[in-house]
Amino acid sequence: MTTTKSKVDHGLLLIVVGLAAWAVPGGGHFIIKERKRGIIIFVTVALTFLAGLYIGSIAVVDRVGAKPWYAAQIMTSPVVGLIANKVEMSVAEDNKPKYVSYGKSHDVGQIYTSVAGMLNLLCIISAVYMTWCGRGEMIGAEEDDT
């Protein structure tokens, strides 16, 4: 009976680590006490994504007109969905989109934001794999002082 419970607990832990790693880049590593790695992941993914937004404007997050790019971008964090809502809901007085982006800066911005999403996807997989293998320590795990 304890093996079934531990399998369920471990499976739940894998899901929690995966969701935390997606919600906040590096969050999954932070949960398994790989804090330095989690901070490095957060800074890298966040700066890459923010650089893409800076280069191409907020309009590079387009879930309607650029679905393949958006699929990569949403891997960064669920916050990308909120940005997409902001872009879609913002309409100027003349019924035209408020945020637009064209040309090379748009393309480069899409590439940067998508690369940030794909990088975070690799980090999500890393956090879940490290948890599955038993690497790292769990937050709330009892210290053994023997």
Image (cartoon, rainbow, N blue to C red):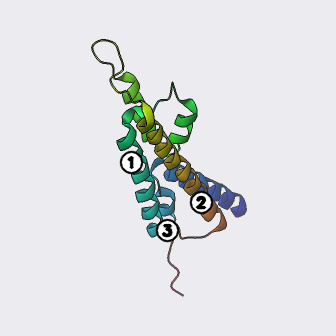
Considering every residue shown, the one lying at the far top of the view is 94
Q: Nearer the viewer, residue 135 or 105?
A: 105
- Where is residue 64 drawn, in percent x and y? 51, 24
| Rendering quarter of residue 125 | bottom right
- Where is residue 111 drawn, in percent x and y? 50, 43
**Residue type, numbered disc 3:** Glu
Specify whether 132 is left or right of 59: right
Specify whether 31 is left or right of 9: left
- Where is residue 25 drawn, in percent x and y? 46, 53
Question: Dot 3: within a 10 Å radius of its alpha carbon, few (fewer than 14), some, or many (20 or more) residues?
Answer: some
Q: Is residue 68 visible?
A: yes
Question: Which is in the foreground here, disc 2 or disc 3?
Answer: 2
Confirm or deny contact between disc 2 and disc 3 (CB under 8 A). Answer: no
**Residue type, numbered disc 1:** Ala
Q: Is residue 43 above or below residue 71?
A: below
**Residue type, numbered disc 2:** Ser
Confirm or deny contact between disc 3 and disc 1 (CB under 8 A). Answer: no
Residue at which label 1 appears: 51
Question: Which is in the foreground here, disc 3 or disc 1?
Answer: 1
Label 2 sits on a secondary structure element that is helix
Q: Is residue 78 visible?
A: no
Q: Earlier in the sequence, mark 2 or mark 3?
A: 3
Distance Cα–Cα, label 3 vs label 1:
26 Å
Query: Residue at 41% across / 28% down in the picture?
Result: 85
Indicate which disc residue 34 carries: 3
Q: Nearer the viewer, residue 73 or 134?
A: 73
Residue at which label 2 appears: 126
Specify whether 14 is left or right of 29: right
Distance Cα–Cα, label 1 vs label 2:
24 Å
Give the quadrant of the C terminus.
bottom right
